[in-house]
Image (cartoon, rainbow, N blue to C red):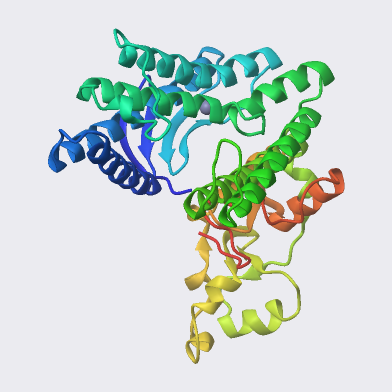
């Protein structure tokens, strides 16, 4: 997910919009304008579009309120919230730490949907205030909207959408709010956060696959209760299922990675005495005498027993042809001043995060300005695989910044 653009700051929390949200905005405005034109013959086209825009912006506010509810509870529990991002399927608050107790998690998770439901029913109540019970015409179920003025039409639509938002989020599949509620209950029963997360994310994956199969069935014309039938609805359901499935498996993996690596010192995965290279040899010499001779991808560069930088395959690849015999390693390396380093006692989870965030493959381990060794992404992954049988090979590990197989260093 992209970082998005920041549009505001509320209660110390940055409010961001992901680009995919602009797509949803357009879709909502389009759909609503068309619906308003059909349902309200008295509205001309430009007024219907105007109302579509207003409704879409109020929808945005509703999602924001839902996320703010989670975030403010988190803050009240002492968990920092950096930002809220609104994207294709709604919003996400960056609540980085796990809640401290099942009770805390329960409250934090449930208050989002509760906010949406309360807001939704309140708006529906206001929309219907003083109206006779609508005579439902099965042929035209939405016809009762017609006598409603603009404000009531808005309240009716926004109320419905908030109720849907609240109900959807209560689906008991982690990491949806309902899944978190389920997790908090399992956590309270088993006293084991990891096991609770595993079961809650299985529930999430099960529901996700049910949605995907349901969506396929809809495309083939089968009527699914509540969702109907047809291509567009079917594709939507598949998309939501696919998204939920990804989120469910990743949420669980990230928790395990954190659980296994937190409080493990980097020292235990450090490769000591890695092959080093002098800075004043040519790139040709580096290739022939070091890269070909070992299976290492990155080499600390030393001068008088001091680390002056690191050079990796990626740096070598940038220099081609005869220049390789004239240019030296210290001209292409990442210098010491630009290197990310860790101390032996640093936390391995933090180290993995630093590696992921910077799209690099290793960190130099330093103690009192002396190089102790290097810790590579693959060493941390191997440690993970030795500790937990339910950690995937490498695919879904946190790789913000798009860690590739290339060794990069900057
Ligand atoms: Zn929520």
Give the image quarter of residue 43. Answer: top left
- The quarter of the picture where residue 5 lies is top left
The foreground one among 407 and 64 is 64
Question: Which residue occupies the foreground of this view, 207 or 189?
Answer: 207
Q: Residue 315's x, y, as percent?
A: 53, 72
Please give left or right for residue 71 compared with residue 243 in the image. left
- Res 240 quadrant in image: top right
Tell me if I can see residue 130 in this picture: yes
- Residue 50 in picture, x, y percent from top left: 18, 36
- Residue positioned 37% across, 34% down in the render: 140
Q: Nearer the viewer, residue 287 or 55?
A: 55
Quick check: 17 left or right of 344? left
Residue 369 shows up from this direction:
no
Left or right, 123 with reference to 248:
left
In the orientation shown, which residue stands out farthest toward the top?
130
At x 76% / y 55%, what residue is drawn?
379
Residue occupying image coordinates x 36% and y 16%: 123
Q: Is residue 182 above or below residue 277?
A: above
Q: Position of residue 30 (x, y in %)?
A: 29, 46
Q: Nearer the viewer, residue 124 or 96?
A: 124
- The structure residue drawn at horizontal position 41% and vertical position 25%, both measured from the top left corner, is 160
User: Is 270 positioned to the left or the right of 65 in the image?
Assistant: right
Task: Give how far across and how far down residue 133 sits, in percent.
Answer: 37, 13
């Amino acid at each position: 997910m992209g970082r998005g653009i920041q549009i505001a700051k509320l209660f110390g929390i940055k409010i961001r919009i992901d680009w995919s949200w602009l797509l949803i905005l357009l879709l909502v405005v389009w759909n609503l304008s068309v619906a308003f034109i059909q349902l309200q013959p008295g509205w001309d086209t430009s007024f219907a579009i105007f109302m579509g825009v207003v409704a879409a912006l109020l929808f945005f506010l509703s999602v924001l309120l839902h996320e703010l509810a989670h975030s403010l509870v988190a803050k009240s529990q002492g968990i920092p919230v950096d930002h809220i991002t609104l994207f294709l399927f709604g919003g996400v608050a960056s609540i980085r730490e796990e809640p401290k107790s099942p009770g805390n998690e329960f409250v934090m998770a449930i208050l989002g949907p509760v906010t949406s439901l309360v807001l939704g029913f309140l708006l529906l109540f206001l929309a219907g205030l003083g109206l006779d019970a609508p005579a439902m015409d099965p042929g035209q179920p939405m016809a009762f909207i017609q006598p409603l003025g603009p404000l009531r039409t808005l309240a009716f639509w926004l109320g419905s959408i908030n109720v849907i938002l609240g109900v959807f989020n209560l689906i008991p599949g982690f990491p949806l709010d309902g899944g978190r509620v389920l997790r908090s209950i399992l956590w309270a029963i088993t006293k084991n956060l990891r096991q609770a997360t595993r079961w809650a994310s299985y529930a999430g994956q099960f529901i996700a696959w049910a949605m995907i199969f349901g969506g396929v069935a809809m495309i083939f014309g089968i009527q699914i209760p509540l969702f109907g039938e047809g291509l567009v609805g079917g594709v939507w359901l598949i998309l939501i299922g696919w998204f939920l499935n990804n989120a469910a498996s990743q949420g669980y993996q990230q928790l395990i990675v954190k659980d296994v690596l937190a409080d493990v010192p980097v020292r235990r995965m450090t490769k000591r005495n890695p092959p080093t290279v002098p800075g004043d040899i040519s790139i040709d010499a580096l290739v022939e005498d070091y890269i070909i001779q070992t299976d290492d991808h990155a080499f600390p560069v030393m001068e008088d027993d001091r680390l002056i930088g690191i050079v990796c395959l990626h740096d070598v690849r940038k220099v081609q042809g005869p220049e390789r015999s004239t240019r030296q390693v210290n001209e292409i390396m990442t210098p010491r001043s630009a290197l990310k380093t860790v101390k032996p006692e640093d936390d391995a989870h933090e180290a993995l995060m630093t590696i992921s965030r910077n799209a690099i493959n290793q960190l130099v381990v330093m103690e009192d300005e002396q190089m102790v060794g290097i810790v590579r992404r693959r060493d941390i992954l191997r440690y993970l695989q030795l500790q937990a049988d339910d950690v995937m090979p490498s695919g879904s590990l946190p790789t913000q910044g798009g860690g590739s197989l290339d060794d990069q260093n900057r």
